[in-house]
Image (tube, rainbow, N blue to C red):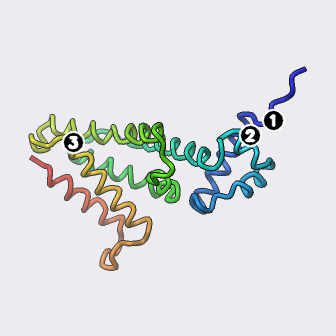
Amino acid sequence: MPRPKVHDEVLRDRLRARAAELLSAHGVTGLSLRTLAADVGTSTTAVYALFGGKPGLVKSLVDDAFRRLRRTLTAVPPTADPAEQLVALGEAYRADALHDPHLYDAMFDRDQLDAESRELQEAAFTPLVEAVERAVDAKVLRHDAHPPTVALGLWSALHGLVSLQLHAHTPDAVDDPAKGFPVVLRAVVDGWRA
């Protein structure tokens, strides 16, 4: 009779779920494998057997976060004005980041990304590039607007604004970052308008 598998998919899912909670509450540095294993009722050996250790576990959470971000951006409905679609995508991006700030930080920590993670990161931003392409094709953006470059500029603005808000670095003169976010984003988009 074969020996039962101790480190199975059920345990893997339980470890991932609890690790996501711990990472969300304490960040990557606060994710203790001992605490995780104890919370799930197993040993740290299970984490190493199923994920190869903490980096593999965090990578799996980050990869899922990029998949979720792609789904979030893909779900943004089209607007009559393709430039406003870019602002709507920015708002969806911000909401996704605010949903789990520690995980958002991990998504952009070079130490957490391998080649597969970078591919998922790239895929997550495909909806933004495609929206820029539609705006250029509709002649809403300048004819010389190179979609990947415009998307990179928008992403940089989004990431910067979100990071400033998440880390409480917004200037005191900005009463509510949530109100300022679309104004700044719209100004960036308007800079590319035809």
Residue pictured at 65% horizontal, 41% vertical: 51
The percent coordinates of residue 169 (x first, y second) are: 38, 72
Figure quadrant of residue 180: bottom left
Mark carried by residue 6: 1
Q: Residue 115 versus residue 182: which sits nearer the camera? A: 115
At label 1, counting other C-alpha atoms closer than 10 Å, the crowd grade (few under 14, some 14-19, many 20 or more) is few
The percent coordinates of residue 11 (x first, y second) are: 74, 40
Amino acid found under the numbered disc labelled 2: Leu
Mark carried by residue 110: none
Q: Residue 9 versus residue 109: which sits nearer the camera? A: 109
Of callouts 1 and 3, the N-terminal one: 1
Q: Indicate left or right for 149 with 139 as reference.
A: right
Residue pictured at 44% horizontal, 55% vertical: 97
Amino acid found under the numbered disc labelled 3: Pro
Q: Nearer the viewer, mark 1 or mark 2?
A: 1
Q: CA separation, marks 3 and 2?
A: 45 Å
Mark carried by residue 82: 3
Q: Residue 74 versus residue 58: which sits nearer the camera? A: 58
Mark carried by residue 11: 2
Is 88 located above or below residue 167 in the figure? above
